[in-house]
């Protein structure tokens, strides 16, 4: 596992539950629960662009799950060059290292909520054009293109999972990551909620445990297509999320209305029939 943040940590837990021994290469120390599952010898702290560290982490590894990221979408819009540096350098190092390991598979967690841009039809299938609106989506498209080129030119056993909007335990509301955890936290603590576009924005929300389960189900499998959507297949608006979180906490939210942001897709729901098949 490369990257042990919100999704990566949960995936390590799921892999361990399935009896799949896992090592982790991550920039920051993972939660104690993850450290206990993998042991000190299988925890490699640092950047995947560090060749020596990467070589040690890849020893005896059959599948690389790549969940390392750069900046969050809003921050990527402000600092696209920095986000590109944080994202591309380690990915390219891993892809280069895997050229010498033709039997090692590679699973990349991409962003199904941003790479398609504003789709012509919902739910959107994997064959739809990728037309991202913002820096974050464009960067994921570039990553996908480089991975697929490695697959075509060097025989990399690569799989790209385009994940929809992921929520669940382990998300940190103070980072501005995840509308559900942010709404819950702000309603509970009395902090105003910033609502963009009148709450009409629709996303496909998927629980982090289901993403981790999808990754685990695909480890060791080489059949099927290279690109797969992973989502719930259902759309939920921000207004509906607000209503649900208010009901969960048991009090109304204080809302500050803002205009819609240009880099955000208005409506996207993923067609997940390929994964189900």
Image: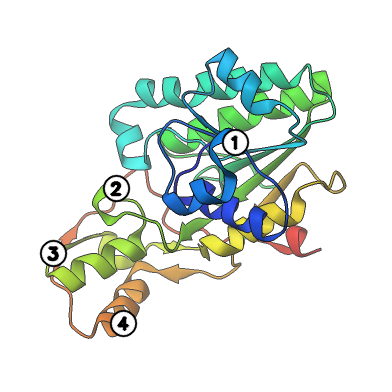
* Rendered position, 28 above or below 183: above
> Which label's residue is closer to the chain start, 2 or 3?
3
Residue toward you, 105 or 201: 105
Image quadrant of residue 246?
bottom left
Q: Which residue is mark 1?
A: 42
> Which label's residue is closer to the chain start, 3 or 4?
3
Observer able to see residue 113: no
Q: Look at 38% across and 48% down and name the residue there.
A: 264
Mark 2 surroundings: few (<14), some (14-19) or many (≥20) residues within 10 A: few
Q: Which residue is mark 3?
A: 192
Q: Looking at the picture, how far across and down is residue 42, in whole percent?
A: 60, 36
Q: Look at 37% across and 35% down and name the residue there.
A: 71
Q: Which residue is mark 2?
A: 261
Marks 3 and 4 in Cβ contact (< 8 Å): no
Marks 2 and 4 in Cβ contact (< 8 Å): no
Q: Looking at the picture, how far across and down is residue 267, in whole percent?
A: 46, 59
> Which label's residue is closer to the chain start, 4 or 1?
1
Q: Split into 4 quadrants, where in the image is the C terminus?
A: bottom right
Q: Would residue 189 be found to the left or right of residue 131 on screen?
A: left
Q: Label for residue 248?
A: 4
Mark 4 surroundings: few (<14), some (14-19) or many (≥20) residues within 10 A: few
Mark 3 surroundings: few (<14), some (14-19) or many (≥20) residues within 10 A: few
Mark 3 element type: loop
Q: Would residue 42 be found to the left or right of residue 205 on screen?
A: right
């Amino acid at each position: 596992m490369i990257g042990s943040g919100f999704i990566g940590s949960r995936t390590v837990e799921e892999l361990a539950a399935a009896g799949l021994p896992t090592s982790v290469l991550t920039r920051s120390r993972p939660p104690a629960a993850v450290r206990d599952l993998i042991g000190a010898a299988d925890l490699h702290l640092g950047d995947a662009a560090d060749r020596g560290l990467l070589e040690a982490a890849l020893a005896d590894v059959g599948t690389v799950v790549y969940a390392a990221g750069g900046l969050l979408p809003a921050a990527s819009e402000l600092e696209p060059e920095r986000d590109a540096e944080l994202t591309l350098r380690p990915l390219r190092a891993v892809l280069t290292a895997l050229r010498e390991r033709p039997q090692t598979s590679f699973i990349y967690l991409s962003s199904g909520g941003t790479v398609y841009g504003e789709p012509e039809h919902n739910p959107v299938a994997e064959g739809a054009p990728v037309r991202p609106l913002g820096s974050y989506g464009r960067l994921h498209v570039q990553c996908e293109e480089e991975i697929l080129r490695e697959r075509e030119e060097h025989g990399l056993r690569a799989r790209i999972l385009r994940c929809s909007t992921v929520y669940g335990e382990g998300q940190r509301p103070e980072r501005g990551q995840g509308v559900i955890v942010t709404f819950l936290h702000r309603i509970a603590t009395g902090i105003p909620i910033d609502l963009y576009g009148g709450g009409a924005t629709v996303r496909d929300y998927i629980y982090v445990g289901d993403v981790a389960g999808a990754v685990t189900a695909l480890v060791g499998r080489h059949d099927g297509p290279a690109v797969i959507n992973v989502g719930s297949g259902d759309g939920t608006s921000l207004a509906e999320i607000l209503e649900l979180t208010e009901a969960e906490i048991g009090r109304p939210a204080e809302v500050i209305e803002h205009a819609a942001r240009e880099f955000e897709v208005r409506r996207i729901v993923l067609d997940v029939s390929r994964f189900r098949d």
